[in-house]
Image (spheres, rainbow, N blue to C red):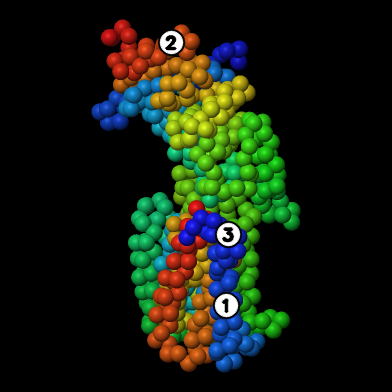
Amino acid sequence: MPNELRHHPILQAIVDQGVLIAFVLLVVFLAFVAPHFVSTANAFSILIDAAPLVLLALCELVVMLVAGIDLAVGAIAGFTGAIAATMMLQGFPWPIATLLALLAAMLAGTLQGVIINYLRVTDFITTLAGLSIFSSLTLIITDGEPMNINANGFNALGEGHLLGVPTQIWIAAFIVLVVALWLGLTASGMHLYAIGGNRVAAYRAGIRVRRLRSFAYAFSGLSAGIAGVILAAQLATADPNAGRGQELPAIAAVVIGGVSLFGGRGSVWGAVLGALILSTILDGLVLLNISPFFTELVEGVVILLAVMMGHLRKRSSN
Amino acid sequence: MPENAPLLELRNIGKRFGAVHALRGIDLQIISGEVLALLGDNGAGKSTLVKIIAGAHAPSSGEMFLAGSKVSLFDPRHAHDLGIETIYQDLAVAENLDVASNIFLGRERKSRMLGFLPILARREMRREAASALEHLAIELPLRQVVGELSGGQRQAVAIARAAYWQARLVIMDEPTAAIGVGEHEAILKLIQNLARSGVAVILVTHTMPDVWQVATRIVVLTRGEKALEGKTEELTEERVVRAMLVGRESDA
């Protein structure tokens, strides 16, 4: 592409806001071709599906900002649901069971962070091992059977409504807000970007790189745990396979949203938009009566398109 | 502290890496406001010495005194706290952050949101960064991401950062190596301005004309030992180069 064209403001705007434009085009397209796409019920249905995905995408966003990756988010989500269900079965009140399960999720994330940053095992291997370990622990805890959850308060987290909006949407929106404030307004949020941008510079500037990177994984564990609570609550069941395989859509969502796999680049806005695009596509497939066997094929193609789009964006900014 | 007492004094500093003597018996004094050129061939021990002063390496032997009191540096953060800043050749800046954020990186100004939540005081930092740049006569777009700046501009960011944080000693490793001809003079001028404001500067370089243009004193290291030391105006390039190649004049 010739230089003057590449820097043309309109083209630049299209490239910069590519994700948003893609989302709008997608919605317009589905509004025309998919029956019943434009309705409040369907909008809520997309957002309900998107809620846990958004939380898992936030996990990936935060660890990818520090040039990491977390393959264990789906497994930790399932693990958290199983722990909460078991504790409720043991007679713990649901708020305590939920808090302790979330604490366990955060601990799981912290453990991964410490192994990656202090014992220097690569993030890929550590979280791949985490994926195996927490999936297996979930099977052990549940004995491979779905566990019913009878606590109404807990189930309301995935079935209830507040001001006419499903609870899990509120929960996801709240966490999105917290993370947006963290990344945008605080020093530690900016330090995540600094570490991803130039780890050596961050270290020399006195930023405690290993501690903050470990904290990113701790956050990832916690956010995955909240996703796990929502997944369990909306089915009133801790499913032994809950969250399984969800790391891929989570990574896809942030890649679609323009988060760099190499660290230092990405926004909450992008991660949320990426998750919404993915949920909308999957919703569209259902409405168009396309076999679920196509789901992962579509996800794969979308990831590739997003990465190629990202390259274009990078080239045009250089 | 008496006038002209050394800001930093090294006594008999040595460093071994296993069987290798990287540095041996280094005595060195540096005074506020001077530009000390640290010269030597590759492997002469310059970077080891610089890392010891910057707190990145611990010396195997010897003592260091900062403004008359004995110090032992364990990490770069500690060196920062004592007013020692190092500007490395690879210009460690976060390319994805803007100029003001880089100047304040690791030491951000904060304000309280809702009375208790500590948040970044971006406007205040931008204002302070602007006045720091103005003080050193540097012109830079504060909101620009550093990755989009030229080599010389990045160097200026690093220098402004050190100056803003009231460094007492700034170590510069090959500051003119990575930048274009057009910006070369500007950087040298900046180094002189920095020294004139009372900062001691250690300049590590291979570029001889730079040395005679800005350095007030020269120290030559050869094979881990101090081979030559003197005021710039009393030394010739020939003597310096000979010291770099063959070592101490009495040995030759």
Mark in the foreground, 1 or 2: 1
Residue found 38% across the figure and 81% down from its top: A143
Which chain is indicated by disc 1? A
Residue found 47% across the figure and 81% down from its top: A238
Which chain is indicated by disc 2? B
Q: Which mark is residue A25?
A: 1
Mark found first going from the N terminus, 3 or 1: 3
Whether discs 1 and 2 lie on one chain: the answer is no
Which chain is indicated by disc 3? A
Judged left or right of residue B46, residue A188 is right
Look at label 3 and name its amino acid: His
Residue underneath mark 2: B235
Q: CA distance from mark 3 to mark 1?
A: 22 Å
Taking depth in this image into account, of A43 and B141 the one nearest to the observer is: B141
Which type of secondary structure does the marked residue at label 2 adopt?
loop
Residue underneath mark 3: A8
Look at label 1 and name its amino acid: Leu
Whether discs 2 and 3 lie on one chain: the answer is no
Q: With respect to residue A63, does B166 lie above or below?
A: above
Q: CA distance from mark 2 to mark 3?
A: 56 Å
Q: With respect to residue A280, does A265 lie above or below?
A: above
Within-10-Å neighbours for mark 3: few <14, some 14–19, many 20+: few
- Outermost residue toward the right in this view: B115
> Residue A48: x percent and y percent?
57, 81
> Residue A60: x percent and y percent?
48, 65
